[in-house]
Image (spheres, rainbow, N blue to C red):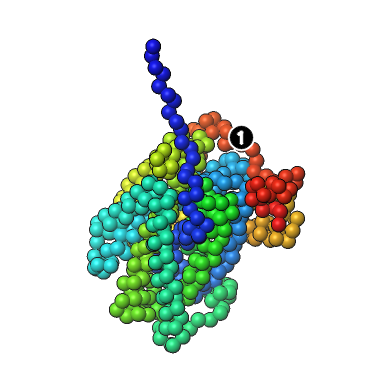
Amino acid sequence: MTKVAPAREEHHELRADGITAAGSIVMAVAGSAPAYSIAATTAVLIAAAGVAGPAALLWCGIPMLGIAWAFSYLGRADVNAGAAYSWVGRALTPILGFFAGWALVVSATIFMVAGALPAGAATVSLFDTKASDNTLLVTVVGAVWFLIMAGAVLVGVRVTARAQWIMSTVEVAILVLFAVLAIVHAATGHHEGPSFDWSWLGFSHFTGLTGAGGFVGAALIAAFYYWGWDVSSNLNEETKNGRKAAGRGGIIGVIIVFLLFEVFTIAVQVILPAKTIAHSNGNLLSILGDEIWPGIGGKILIIAVALSTIATLETTLIQVTRTLFAMGRDHTIPLAFGRANPRWRTPAVATIVVTCVSLILFVGSNFLGSVGEILADAVSSIGLQIAFYYALAAIAVIVAYRRIVFKSVKNFIFIALWPGLGAVFMLFIFFAGIEASLSTPIVIAIGIGALVIGVIPVIVFYRKGKAYYGRRPLELPEDRMTSQIAINTNDPRVE
């Protein structure tokens, strides 16, 4: 008698309860990478907006917080590692949901290509400042860090969480220390830039100096600053009480990084001369540190940048692999992406594939242009993709909760008004950003072209993904508004 081999067990579940509520906040902060964003992007922001840079961060931060509220409420209704991919697909239309997820996948992949280089440069600078100009050495070191982070993501979310606690705690502690030192330094009159003026937080400098086009360009850059906090939502299946904790972590994370971004952007403009900022070449925090604390300050802030860059490479890997995992599980891309490793309960195939693709693109891109060119083009391209999927998520929460938005003032503000303003803002900078980038073909090619490529998997896997493309809408009808439902599902409708 021939024995029939048992069917191979499929694993489509991630490890539950691997992230605590506090860990969710840490992940959100690490995802936005405050030290990396300040070091790599502040010079680009100031070049686009001048002294209106703090205003761009403020007026992008307010709608961004509305997007964070949208993610929070959507996460309460649907716990899914795909986050915006699932929510937009169920609340609006599956096609838009797929492209929301695809936008995250391509933006995260592009970022990993651009982000591994600063990780290598910051590490090399700790030992020899001049060696950071060695492209080959920086590329190799960046690749090594990327592989280490990929290994941490592969072997389990608990390992990832521990690594983030260490790296992000040290990073934020250093930034808070230097934020205080920068304020004291500027207050004592030790600065070469202009004195701070509250008008830097208004619109007068945009209308008087840079115009509407300058605001759009600055807003796209500011969106890149904040981007990444939503990694907490992609981890909702792996977070304790993920329905509430994941979204709450994103909101608190946005507030923390907003404060850090504002303080350091203002400090840079006040303490450093414009010429130094323009020629910083991604090394701005080190220069600022040397000015504030001569001799050792620059080295300490290089440590913060290195930790921040390495940490955000890890969180970006988490975002893209969890989104691909959700897509694979739904058969909208190859099913292999939707399988979890039976031992580690992580999306192993997605992690390995993304790591290999990113390394190939990373090594190739670093020999095609300068560091500054790569970063500038990547920031603008990613800004378009970020605005696209954030806007869709903000619209999705209004549609999903449409029956209850007028049930209370709280619901109206946090489910409809604030996310609605966020959606309008993101759509505005998306379309205006396309128009402003017409003179930069590489930005359009990467930012929009990469999105268009998503049509291919939609066509190829449309039939296999019929469960996703024909799924039940994400809506919260009136007849479910009972206290018992609220207790069982953490439904936010019952106050």
Residue found 44% across the figure and 46% down from its top: 321
Residue 358 placement (x, y as % from top left): 36, 48
Residue 29 placement (x, y as % from top left): 47, 61
Nearest the viewer among 218 and 214 is 218
Residue 88 placement (x, y as % from top left): 59, 46
Which residue is label 1 attached to? 470
Q: Is residue 36 positioned above or below 157 on the image?
A: below
Q: Is residue 434 visible?
A: no
Q: Give the quarter of the figure containing the C terminus.
A: bottom right
Nearest the viewer among 473 and 109 is 473
Residue found 57% across the figure and 40% down from its top: 95
Q: What amino acid does circle 1 point to?
A: Gly
Q: Is residue 249 positioned above or below 357 on the image?
A: below
Q: Is residue 85 positioned above or below 22 on the image?
A: above
Q: Residue furthest bottom?
A: 188
Q: Is residue 154 visible?
A: yes
Residue 74 placement (x, y as % from top left): 61, 50
Q: Give the quarter of the figure containing the N terminus.
A: top left
